[in-house]
Amino acid sequence: MPEAPDLKVIVDFLNKRAKGLAVDSARVVKPSVVRPLAGDVGKDIPGRTLDGFERRGKFVLVSLSGGRMLAINPMLTGLFQWCSSADKPFKRTCLVLALSDGHDLRYLDDKQMGMVYYCRPEQVAVIPKFKDGVPDVLDDIPYAEFKQRLRPFRGEIKGVLTRGDFVTGIGNAYADELLFEARIYPFKKSTRLSGEELRRLHGAMKPVMEWAIAEPERRVGEDIHEKIRDFLKVHDKGGQPCPRCGNPISELTANQRITSYCRRCQPGLLIRN
Ligand SMILES: [Zn+2]
């Protein structure tokens, strides 16, 4: 689930609360999600300090003192938890960093789809799915660049947005929200978008991301593992009235992913080839 707005809220929180703390112990609970590229996590991390947290696309990068890094790709199901070291771990806990102030930073993943890479900073660029050099949805991408970057892509606009090669940080939920805001049919080929539609999609990015960050930021507190998505306008709201026109929101599942949209506000023909 975590997309750029969710991860921004988490990273901001961790920079306030965890930055500068030392790691007393590191415990790998689910080895299948950890790739130790720069040493044994349990032995090599303790004694290092958390130097800072950064989001890059859908990755969270944790800088550790002494030239090490955790590059975490939570995919669809990974989450971060901030809690007291005394708290009983959830079953889905995969990695536990016990910190010098009595808190734990834990990585949770109930389907174990995500991946935690322990690496040197120079190894980050070669990590699978790390989109180096692709602009981020939270950057202010100028319209000319936006249009230029979209040109080589041929698929349906929803898929182009979520794959992360055009712009990074957008997942299933915010692709639906952006397309709703821009009044674009999600299955329209990106090559067939009109100039007007491109303008609207570009123009939707900033306002949608702004409220996507503001709402969880206001509500999340210390519970950064909670999913706050109930404020979305269309995503996962199938059957509920469209907030713009009142028509029931449609929901389709393709490739195990839900697409929610309003047939009236985002008209189009479902032609698949
Ligand atoms: Zn509508």
Image (cartoon, grey):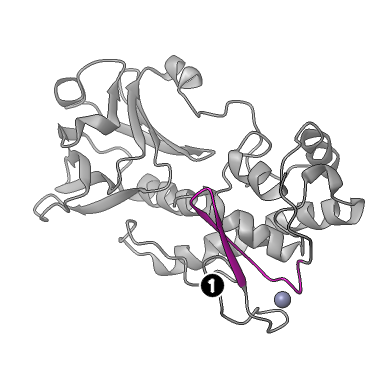
Q: Quadrant of residue 263?
A: bottom right
Q: Looking at the image, which residue is at 71% across and 65% down?
A: 181
Residue 78: image location, x then y, percent: 35, 46
Q: Is 255 in the magenta?
A: yes
Q: Looking at the image, which residue is at 17% across and 27% down?
A: 46
Residue 260: image location, x then y, percent: 60, 65
Residue 34: image location, x then y, percent: 27, 29
The residue most toward the right is 195
Residues drawn in magenta? 250-266
For label 1, count other residues whose C-alpha is less than 10 Å away and answer few (under 14), some (14-19) or many (20+): some
> Would you say the beta carbon of the disc 1 residue lies within 8 angstroms of ligand 1?
no
Query: Quick one: quadrant of the C terminus?
Result: top right
| Along the line of sight, the residue nearer the viewer: 169 or 272 | 272
Q: Looking at the image, which residue is at 73% across and 82% down?
A: 245
Q: What residue type is labelled 1?
A: Lys
| Along the line of sight, the residue nearer the viewer: 5 or 196 | 196
Judge left or right: residue 32 versus residue 144.
left
Judge left or right: residue 269 versus residue 224.
right
| Along the line of sight, the residue nearer the viewer: 25 or 20 | 25
> What count of labels does the image hold?
1
Element type at marker 1? loop
The residue that label 1 is drawn on is: 237
Judge left or right: residue 58 versus residue 195.
left
| Along the line of sight, the residue nearer the viewer: 236 or 221 | 236
Q: In which quarter of the image is residue 144?
A: top right
Q: In which quarter of the image is residue 226?
A: bottom left
From what the image shows, is residue 68 above or below residue 189? above
Residue 173: image location, x then y, percent: 55, 57
Q: Is 105 in the magenta?
A: no
Q: Quadrant of ligand 1?
A: bottom right
Q: Looking at the image, which residue is at 42% across and 19% down?
A: 121
From what the image shows, is residue 249 above or below residue 68? below
